[in-house]
């Protein structure tokens, strides 16, 4: 279900996308509303599911994860049980930051973080290649990331 948003809702969403830590008073100041009005609108956006939560963005390099690799995974078997087993197993690997079931050459796209290339090799050999039904794996090492964020509005 698509939710109808007015200009004020869009301004609120832009403000929260830029800084998810803003409280209702601060959002109100940015968009020109009182604190109670901003709070009610934010609450409504949460209740209808437009805002699904707030999070913080960590600096992976400052935490020692200098390598990002995107993997294309082709499964050997494609039954519901194989897919469920793969998804359950991949979700238990902390270095896998993102797992997407996709249509195309590969069945899954994974984003894996590692401390260095030898750490990635260990993750690949001991964790990824041993996942249920894994067939072909293609690796793409991230060289640079020029995205400024994931703003939708």
Image (tube, grey):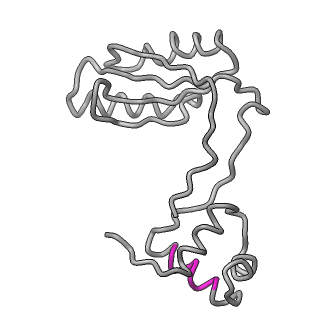
Judging depth in this view, the residue of 127 and 25 nearest the camera is 25
Judging depth in this view, the residue of 112 and 14 nearest the camera is 14
Q: Relative to 53, is 115 on the left or the right?
A: right
Residue 20 higher or lower than 74, as above or below: below
| Percent coordinates x, y for residue 129 in the rendering | 43, 13
User: From the image, which quarter does the N terminus lie in?
Assistant: bottom left
Q: Residue at x 50, y 17 (%)?
A: 127
Residue 122 higher or lower than 145, as above or below: above
| Percent coordinates x, y for residue 51 in the rendering | 52, 67
Judging depth in this view, the residue of 79 and 27 nearest the camera is 27
Q: Residue at x 29, y 24 (%)?
A: 105
Q: Residue at x 63, y 89 (%)?
A: 37
Q: Residue at x 58, y 24 (%)?
A: 142
Residue 28 higher or lower than 119, as above or below: below
Magenta residues: mostly which secondary structure?
Answer: helix
Please tell me whether residue 125 belongs to the stretch shown in magenta: no
* Residue 145 position by quadrant: top right
Q: Relative to 54, is 133 on the left or the right?
A: left
Residue 85 higher or lower than 131, as above or below: below
Q: Relative to 1, is 14 on the left or the right?
A: right
Read off the magenta span.
38-45
């Amino acid at each position: 279900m698509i939710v109808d948003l007015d200009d004020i809702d869009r301004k609120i969403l832009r403000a929260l996308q830029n800084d998810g830590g803003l409280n209702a008073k601060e959002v109100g100041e940015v968009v020109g509303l009182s604190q109670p009005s901003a709070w009610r609108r934010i609450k409504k956006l949460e209740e209808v599911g437009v805002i699904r939560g707030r999070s913080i963005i960590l600096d992976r390099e400052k935490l020692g994860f200098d390598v990002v690799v995107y993997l294309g995974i082709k499964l050997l078997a494609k039954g519901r049980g194989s897919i469920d087993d793969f998804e359950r197993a991949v979700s238990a690997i902390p270095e896998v930051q993102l797992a997407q079931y996709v249509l195309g050459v590969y069945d899954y796209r994974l984003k894996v973080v590692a401390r260095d290339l030898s750490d990635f090799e260990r993750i690949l050999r001991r964790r990824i290649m041993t996942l249920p039904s894994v067939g072909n794996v293609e690796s793409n090492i991230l060289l640079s990331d020029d995205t400024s964020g994931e703003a939708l509005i």
